Image: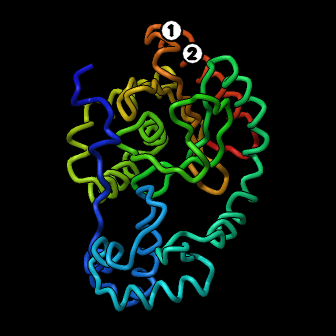
C-alpha cells in the first residue's frame, strides 16, 4: 500500500464550520447555544485541557465571550477547571449519554457474540452508528492489554476514511447516501474525492460479501474489517467492526477467513428483533 494511504489519522482534520454557515439564514437557530456546544466540541480532537485563548482561536470568537460561555458550562457541570486553571470536560457530560445508551439494550445482548469473535480474532470488536460525518462507537469488547488502539465508547472516526464508516454507508439508500456525502464533504473537504474508489469498493463488497476491509489506512498498525448489521427499529444504522494489530494476521487470512466470519456474526446480530433492515 502506498504511503499516501496509510496513517490517515496524522493528516485528516475535521473542518470547523463557521457559525454563519451553520445557521445559513435560519433565524430560528440559537447562535448562543451553537457557540456553547462548539466549545465542548473543541475537545473532540483529544485535548485534555484548553485555555481560554485556545478555545477562542479554534471557534473564532473573542476571549470575553468564551469566558462567559465557559462559566455557564461550568455551572452546568459540563466543564471544569484543572489545578492550573485550564478548562477540561466534566463528568456531567457522561450523564447526558446515559439515556442514549440505556435505550440501546441490544448492545448488551451483543456482548457475548462480540467477545467470542474478539477472542477468536485476537482483536477488539465494536458496534458503531453514524454521528454526522463520523461514525461513533457505542460498544467495544476485547483485550486492551498491549493493544495499539482501543476504540472506546464515544470515540469517533471519519466515515469516508474508515472501514467502519464505509460499512455504515452501505446501509443507506442512494438518496440518503447522497445527503451523507454532503455532510462528509462539508466537514472533511476533499475526503470523498480522495477515498471515492475505496468507498465504492467497500459498499459493493458489503452488499456482495457482507464485509469490507482496510489495511493500515486509518492507523498504520491496525488492520480493520467491518460488517453492516442493519437498521434499528428507531432508525439507527449499525455496523460491527474489528481491529487487529497488523502483525497478527495476513491480509489473505482476513479476506478469506476472519472477515467472512465477522459477516456471519453480523448476520447473527441481525436476527435480534430490534433490527428491521
Quarter of the figure that contains the C terminus: top right
Query: Which residue is at a point 40% across and 67% down the rendered structure image?
Result: 42
Give the labeled residue for mark 2. Answer: 258
Image height of 240 relative to 55, above or below: above
Query: Which residue is at a point 67% across and 52% down the rendered structure image?
Result: 233
Query: Which residue is at a point 33% across and 85% down the rendered structure image?
Result: 26
Residue 36 lies left or right of residue 154; in this view the side is left
Image height of 187 relative to 140, above or below: below
Mark 1 Cα shell of 10 Å, populated few (<14), some (14-19), many (≥20) = few
Q: Quadrant of residue 10?
A: top left
In the drawing, what numbered circle is on residue 253?
1
Contact flag, marks 2 and 1 (Cβ < 8 Å): yes
- Residue 224 x, y percent position in the rendering: 47, 27
Q: Residue furthest front?
A: 84
Q: How is the image coloured?
A: rainbow
Quarter of the figure that contains the N terminus: top left
Image height of 58 relative to 154, above or below: below
Mark 2 Cα shell of 10 Å, populated few (<14), some (14-19), many (≥20) = some
Residue 92 lies left or right of residue 181; in this view the side is right
Q: Is residue 212 visible?
A: no
Q: CA distance from mark 2 to mark 1?
A: 6 Å
Foreground of the two, 209 or 115: 115
Query: Which residue is at a point 21% across and 30% down the rendered structure image?
Result: 4
Q: Is residue 170 visible?
A: yes
- Residue 78 x, y percent position in the rendering: 58, 76
Foreground of the two, 5 or 170: 5
Amino acid at each position: 500500500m502506498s504511503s499516501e494511504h496509510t496513517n490517515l489519522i496524522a493528516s485528516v482534520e475535521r473542518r470547523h464550520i463557521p457559525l454563519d454557515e451553520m445557521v445559513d439564514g435560519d433565524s430560528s437557530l440559537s447562535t448562543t447555544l451553537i457557540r456553547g456546544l462548539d466549545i465542548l466540541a473543541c475537545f473532540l480532537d483529544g485535548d485534555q485541557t484548553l485555555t481560554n485563548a485556545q478555545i477562542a482561536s479554534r471557534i473564532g470568537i473573542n476571549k470575553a465571550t468564551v469566558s462567559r460561555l465557559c462559566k455557564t458550562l461550568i455551572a452546568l457541570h459540563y466543564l471544569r477547571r484543572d489545578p492550573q486553571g485550564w478548562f477540561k470536560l466534566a463528568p456531567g457530560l457522561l450523564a447526558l449519554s446515559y439515556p442514549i445508551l440505556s435505550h440501546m439494550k441490544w448492545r448488551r445482548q451483543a456482548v457475548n457474540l462480540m467477545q467470542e469473535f474478539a477472542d477468536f480474532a485476537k482483536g477488539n470488536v465494536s458496534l458503531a452508528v453514524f454521528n454526522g460525518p463520523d461514525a461513533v462507537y457505542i460498544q467495544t469488547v476485547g483485550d486492551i492489554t498491549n493493544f495499539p488502539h482501543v476504540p472506546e465508547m464515544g470515540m469517533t472516526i471519519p466515515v469516508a476514511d474508515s472501514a467502519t464508516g464505509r460499512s455504515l454507508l452501505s446501509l443507506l439508500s442512494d438518496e440518503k447516501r447522497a445527503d451523507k456525502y454532503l455532510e462528509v464533504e462539508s466537514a472533511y473537504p476533499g475526503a470523498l474525492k480522495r477515498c471515492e474508489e475505496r468507498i465504492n469498493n467497500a459498499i459493493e463488497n458489503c452488499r456482495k460479501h457482507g464485509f469490507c476491509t482496510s489495511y493500515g489506512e486509518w492507523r498504520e498498525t491496525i488492520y480493520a474489517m467491518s460488517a453492516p448489521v442493519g437498521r434499528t427499529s428507531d432508525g439507527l444504522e449499525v455496523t460491527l467492526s474489528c481491529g487487529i494489530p497488523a502483525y497478527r494476521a495476513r491480509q489473505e487470512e482476513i479476506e478469506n477467513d476472519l472477515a467472512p466470519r465477522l459477516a456471519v456474526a453480523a448476520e447473527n446480530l441481525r436476527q435480534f428483533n430490534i433490527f428491521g433492515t
